[in-house]
Image (cartoon, grey):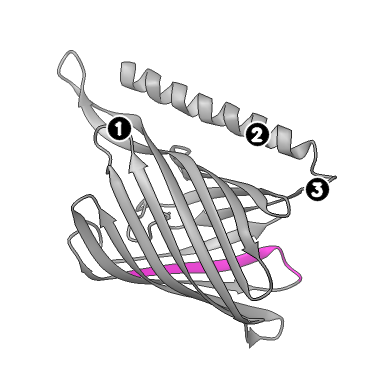
Amino acid sequence: MSQIKNSKQRIAAVLIGLFFATFVFSQEATKSHTFSGAITATNNGISLLPTFSLGKPAAIFDFSIKSKRWSFDPQLRFSLEGKPWSFIFWGRYKIVNDSKFKLSVGAHPAIAFKEEKVLSLNGDAKMILNAYRYTATEIAPNLILSKNLSIGMYYLYSHGWDVGTTTNTHFVTLNSTIANVKVLPETFLKLQPQLYYLKMDSKDGYYVSSTFTLTTPKSPFAVSSIVNKAIQTTISGKDFVWNMSLIYNY
């Protein structure tokens, strides 16, 4: 019962924190901040680390409150059954933001939720939803080669604070973005391939992944797909992960 109580307290604290942070930022939105977001429905929720997935349909809610250099970018993820999957609260700062080169840093607290089987006092097994705490930092340099082509690197370090979590995670990528590839009249494709290295405590692996997104300029909807393939790894998980998503941007 104490585990269930702690999980509920953590969820409540996160939601209250999100409400007040959004309220404070929104008070000045008309002065110096902009607000945007997206709602995603997918057949398979894929993690920030693409080798991991929820394994079932999910809904993802993205929010972004931006000033010239700062942004607050929370992301709330749920299974379509309504159960929380993960809550991530990014704060980001653009150190360099010119037309040819960009460099940003960020940090977040996060809570990941996991269903686990436990034994009750009478010996019966039941499923409970446990919450696990993480913090992470990131750095993302990006070189703009042309209007529709950029290359970059990305590094994320994550630390798990609870028993049963991965204590130290290192995620390093080489990535690129190819935008505005015309596939049909008024329909454009954006490709975001990446090669990455993932180390989780003593285990590590090499992977390749890509995101494909179809958009039309006059519609807020987009269709997206993520594919991920392990090259060589000692980390447990599926060798190939993919999904299809419908995104509503606002």
In this view, 13 is above or below 168: above
Q: Which amino acid does label 2 sit on?
A: Ala
Per the rendered image, the range of residues in magenta is: 218-228
| Numbered label attached to residue 32 | 3
Q: Which of marks 2 and 1 is nearer the N terminus?
A: 2
Picture coordinates of residue 104, whole percent (x, y) = 56, 59
Left or right of 1 in this view: 110: right
Could you tell me if the residues under marks 2 and 1 are in contact, i.e. CB atoms within 8 Å? no
CA–CA distance between discs 1 and 3?
A: 38 Å
| Numbered label attached to residue 21 | 2
In this view, 228 is above or below 235: below
Disc 3 element: loop
Left or right of 179 in this view: 55: left
Disc 2 element: helix
- The residue tagged 1 is 162
CA–CA distance between discs 2 and 1?
A: 25 Å
